[in-house]
Image (spheres, rainbow, N blue to C red):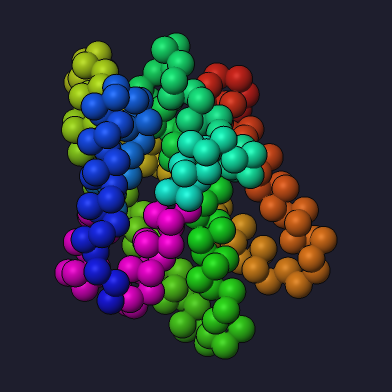
Amino acid sequence: MTNQKPVTARMYALLQELEKASDRRAIFLNCYLLMTQNVLESIQEGEFNDPDWVDTLLHRFADYYFEALTAYELNDPATPAVWQLAHRAAGKSETSVLQNLLLGINAHINYDLVLTLVDLLEPEWRQLSADRREQRHSDYCQVNQIIRYTIDAVQDDVVERYSPIMDLVDKMLGSLDEWLISQLITKWRDEVWDKAVGMMTTVDIEERRRLLDRLETTTLDRAKAIQFKGRL
């Protein structure tokens, strides 16, 4: 199994840099680090059918985040558009803490996670039995459960840390706000699996390119909606 320390250590080191610079991109990364730690703990506790596969998925997923961040810092035009928007928004004072968080989640789940699943599933998909495919999907869905119990910690340890007014919102809404965010992320992740399977089982190159273009458009539309410029 892949060593779990480097990925969380790298996230933590970057988080320290961002917080020292008062860079609001720390908001999403703080959330991402919490969720990554919880998934890694669940792997160690044997909560998955194939812990090695989940471990590989988690690390490849993180690669996409770091690669997009590095590309953005280098002004690489190949930086995914949805990440360009999320990074730029973090530098705007009118963007709320919750918007910064959701913009990062949107880019990483609705875009990066589709490509991550294609990377991992495509080489093996045709050889997998129906039972093994279901195990892959079951492990993927188990992460949704981890997200659900992480959301409350994200509210307490991340969102309220950057925006104390959210503590008042949390007290007024009880668990409703966490439930709504969790449901939104779960909805997105359900769609992601279907999109990844559709993309990797498409043999026509042009059709796959169209699916990728559609993926980019959808994630950008959702990012604009998070900024109150459209519909989620």
Q: Quadrant of the N terminus?
A: bottom left
| Residue 4 in view here | yes
**Residue 169: x and y, percent?**
26, 18
Seen in the picture, residue 28 relative to 139 is either above or below; the reply is above
Name the residue at 36% across, 36% down. 28
Q: Nearer the viewer, residue 151 or 85?
A: 85
Q: Nearer the viewer, residue 209 or 199?
A: 209
**Residue 231: x and y, percent?**
60, 27
Which residues fall within the magenta stretch? 37-64
Q: Dividing the picture into quarters, in which one does residue 176 lie?
A: top left
Query: With 218 as the anchor, is 59 left or right in this view?
Result: left
Seen in the picture, residue 214 relative to 173 is either above or below; the reply is below
Q: Is residue 62 magenta?
A: yes
Name the residue at 71% across, 47% down. 214
Q: Nearer the viewer, residue 59 or 194?
A: 59
| Residue 109 in view here | no
